[in-house]
Image: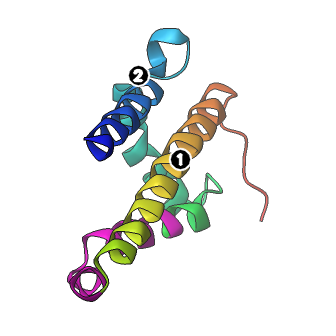
Amino acid sequence: MAKTLKRAAAFTALARALTAGSRGGPSVAQRLGALPRMIKASTRGEYDGGMRLALMAAATAYVVSPIDAVPEAFVWVFGLIDDAVAVTWLAGAVLAETDRFLEWEKTGRPAVVK
């Protein structure tokens, strides 16, 4: 019962963070729409998010990869904890980076100096 309540509280907090658009920040739709533009701008060298995008891609690959199933099979709790840490970091990184990218777009897309 306590685990269910904690899980529900965590999902509620995540939902509140994602729906921050109603309180003046970018909405979930704006953030999701910004991801392809952010990737495109980074690959063209216009936006300096390349390393952060690479880390986000690596975290996503880690969470969904079958190799990650090995820790869950042998040390169930610790295997799930590493997933929770990776997903939490990934959610925070996506939120922060999309905020940064949307602000970059608003300011007239200054050129990245190499």
Q: Please, is residue 57 above or below residue 34 in the view?
A: below
How many badges with numbers are in the image? 2
The residue segment tinted magenta is 55-74
Name the main secondary structure of what is drawn in magenta: helix
Task: Give the residue type at disc 1.
Answer: Gly
Q: Who is closer to the viewer here, 88 or 42?
A: 88
Residue on which disc 1 sits: 92
16 lies left or right of 110 = left
Which residue: 61% across, 53% down?
Answer: 46
Residue on which disc 2 sits: 19
Q: For the view shown, which residue lies furthest in the top direction?
A: 23
Label 1 neighbourhood size at 10 Å, few (<14), some (14-19), many (20+)?
Answer: some
Report x, y in % for residue 25: 55, 19
Task: Give the residue type at disc 2.
Answer: Thr
Which residue: 63% across, 39% down?
Answer: 100
Report x, y in % for residue 105: 59, 32
Q: Who is closer to the viewer here, 90 or 8?
A: 8
Callouts 1 and 2 close, C-beta under 8 Å: no
Asked if residue 3 lies in the magenta stretch, the reply is: no
SS class of the residue under badge 2?
A: loop
Asked if residue 60 lies in the magenta stretch, the reply is: yes
Q: Which mark sits nearer the N-terminus, 1 or 2?
A: 2
Quadrant position of residue 79: bottom left
